[in-house]
Image (cartoon, grey):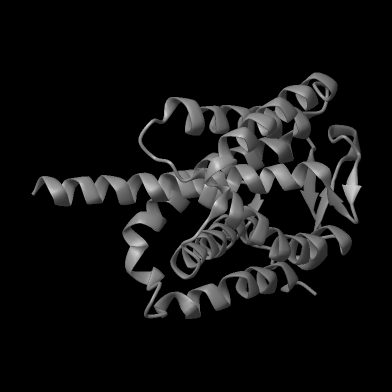
């Protein structure tokens, strides 16, 4: 089925896009914050994607692709970095609006420190695996910056809640992509540990992807608010 990956992309973004006009969240009105966040993050992850294709970390099953490629990447893979971040940041914003009470605030820094430690440990044991080392190395740098270099934006307690909720659609979507498979992983470049058919590293890949998008989304929102106050 040549349209399968494309249909998965459409399914991912369909409901978030339709519900973006919800009167309470009105997510569509925040396009000037979410769009640059998605574009900047997308460029970073597309470079990452191209690198992994060259390094034979993963490949794509042509039986489930429409056959249109740009720079060696299938159209559907490029769309993935639009549809998934939009859907995940939409979840993040909905949770903040409908459930403003969040008890994770007191634990978020400890959780980030734990994740930083996990990154160091896995880098030590998986340094010879391309997907493992780049994945956890990137997460370590981004997380370290957000928690310890960035002093203005405090959103991690909201982020972690959104990440946990995003895991549900993640298991559905990534389950399809890896079980069929649409995306084929080279086990020589991973820890070869899977949750079902999903590589262990993919959970942290999603974490990095969502974190960078949410950080930039909050950054652009905060900058606009400061500019408005200044006026």
Residue at x 69%, y 70% (from the top left corner): 8
Left or right of 197 on screen, residue 104: left
Which x, y percent locates residue 217?
Answer: 41, 50
- Looking at this view, name the residue that lies furthest to the left: 231
Left or right of 63 on screen, residue 8: left
In the image, residue 103 above or below residue 48: below
Q: Nearer the viewer, residue 215 or 186?
A: 215
Which quarter of the image is occupied by the N terminus?
Answer: bottom right
Residue at x 57%, y 48% (from the top left corner): 104
Residue at x 82%, y 44% (from the top left corner): 200
Left or right of 121 on screen, residue 216: left
In the image, residue 148 above or below residue 71: above
Choose top left, top right, bottom left or bottom right for residue 132: top right
Which x, y percent locates residue 146?
Answer: 48, 34
Left or right of 85 on screen, residue 27: left
Q: Nearer the viewer, residue 222 or 189?
A: 222
Can residue 27 be seen from the camera position used here? yes
Which x, y percent locates residue 112?
Answer: 61, 35
Can residue 70 be seen from the camera position used here? no
Which x, y percent locates residue 87?
Answer: 55, 65
**What number of labels is visible?**
0
In the image, residue 219 above or below residue 11: above
């Amino acid at each position: 089925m040549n349209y399968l990956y494309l249909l998965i992309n459409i399914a991912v973004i369909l409901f978030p896009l339709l519900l973006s006009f919800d009167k309470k969240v009105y997510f569509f009105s925040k396009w000037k914050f979410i769009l640059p966040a998605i574009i900047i993050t997308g460029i970073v992850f597309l470079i990452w994607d191209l690198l992994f294709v060259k390094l034979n970390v993963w490949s794509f099953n042509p039986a489930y692709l429409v056959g249109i490629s740009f720079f060696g990447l299938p159209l559907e893979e490029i769309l993935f970095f639009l549809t998934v971040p939009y859907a995940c940041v939409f979840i993040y914003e909905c949770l903040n609006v409908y459930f403003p009470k969040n008890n994770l605030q007191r634990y978020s820094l400890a959780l980030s420190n734990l994740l930083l430690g996990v990154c160091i440990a896995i880098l030590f044991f998986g340094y010879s695996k391309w997907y493992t080392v780049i994945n956890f190395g990137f997460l370590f740098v981004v997380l370290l910056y957000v928690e310890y270099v960035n002093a203005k934006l405090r959103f991690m307690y909201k982020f972690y809640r959104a990440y946990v909720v995003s895991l549900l659609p993640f298991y559905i979507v990534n389950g399809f992509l890896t079980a069929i498979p649409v995306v084929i992983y080279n086990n020589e470049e991973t820890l070869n540990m899977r949750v079902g058919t999903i590589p262990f590293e993919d959970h942290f890949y999603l974490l990095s992807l969502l974190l960078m998008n949410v950080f930039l989304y909050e950054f652009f929102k905060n900058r606009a608010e400061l500019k408005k106050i200044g006026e």
